[in-house]
Image (cartoon, rainbow, N blue to C red):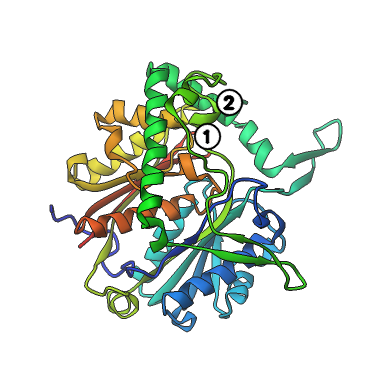
Amino acid sequence: MKEVKSMFPRARIPYGTWGSSYFPAWQMSPLAEVNISQFAGEAMANILGKRKVSRKELEYLVIGSTIPWHWKFWNAPVVASCFGHRIPGYQTEQACATGLTSVVLAGSEVNSESYDVVGVLTFDRTSDSPVGVFPERRSYRRTEVIADVWDNFGFDPSTGGAMIATAGLTARKYKINRSEVDELTYLRYKQYFEAKNSGFFNRYLFPFDVLNVQGKLVGKISEDVGVRQITLQSLKEQRELDSCITSGTQTHAADGMATILVASPGKAKELSSKPEINIEFIAKVDIRTLPGLMPESPGMAVQKLLQRTGLTMDDMAVVKNHNPFAVNDAIFAKTMKYDWAKMNKTGCSLVWGHPQAPTLTRILIEALEEAVDLGGGYVLVFGCAAGDVGTAGIFRVS
């Protein structure tokens, strides 16, 4: 393994201190009925309890969410109270890149020696997202109303178009073939179900009971509700919504949470279930491409990241990404000259859904678990966000 200097030499991710809920699809589970911040805080406490990590170890909390939730003004402190440990913290959001950004911010807090242990908690509920009413004197109606999830998905201020239009536009730019996108999607589903059937998900996904305000059981979140087996023929039969884009070759809105800890080297060994495993931060970059070309931005971010570190794709033991559209992977493979069959071997957001903030957190957790199985190496995670932004990060497992 090539030796590359760490961006945060005093920060580590302790192995086995992470976990995630399953991600049920929009409106398909009891999570549609809860305050997602309260659920996330309580779920984090539950996960750490099962990991045998005392919540008292945490000194600070970085939360990430993108969709307004009730009492969001109080942000990390109120979530920490739901977690059961009164610690300070703050909230961050960077659209679909929130998960990776939150982990990096926690790494910065630890690396600065402000804290020894920082918790990262990311969550979102796309179901029944709130509607905001904004005073607008320039409007003849005097007010503007926005349904937070759907209106933002449907309107990019840079282009006036919807998110799906970015996928179609970029597919045409790179002359992506529809049959390749269908084949790629079929493989992604196959990878997901192979990982599920192998028991891989049991290492980091936790089932949760959901209770109502009277404490009665509403339901159990114990699978990625909405994910179904597909066939290549069924994908080929679907109508195109835009160039190379069908209902089957894009992700779906979902609800969920994911958590991970960042600690000083000494504390990481103390908290980890496998202290011999060392997980370091290597580098992270964001870029912005031209308006409406979101699916090409992740590849551009990876190119910049590799140039900065001197690493190559061949140096990567694990490659995983947030791919809201299957064309993202096809474009990445074409521009990076990389085989898309080598990516996302244990699942991806194209299949299991997109609750926004926790998406890249779950991807990172899966990638780190996969790297441990391989005996270590460099881990590359990347994705797109908010119209035309690309993000990418490299971690080292040894």
Q: Please name the amino acid that badge 2 sits on.
A: Thr
Q: Secondary structure at mark 1?
A: loop
Q: Is residue 396 visible?
A: no
Q: Where residue 141 appears, x then y in whole percent?
A: 86, 33
- In the image shown, does 62 or 332 lie closer to the viewer? 332
Specify the label residue 159 is tagged with.
2
- Name the amino acid type tagged 1: Gly
Residue 261: mark in rendering? none
In the image shown, does 271 or 388 lie closer to the viewer? Answer: 271
In this image, 367 relative to 169: left or right? left
Q: CA distance from mark 1 to mark 2?
A: 9 Å
In the displayed structure image, the side of residue 319 where residue 136 appears, left or right: right
Q: Residue at x 27, y 64 (%)?
A: 279
Relative to 215, residue 304 above or below = above
Q: Label for residue 387?
A: 1
Where residue 66 sits: x, y (%)? Answer: 59, 51
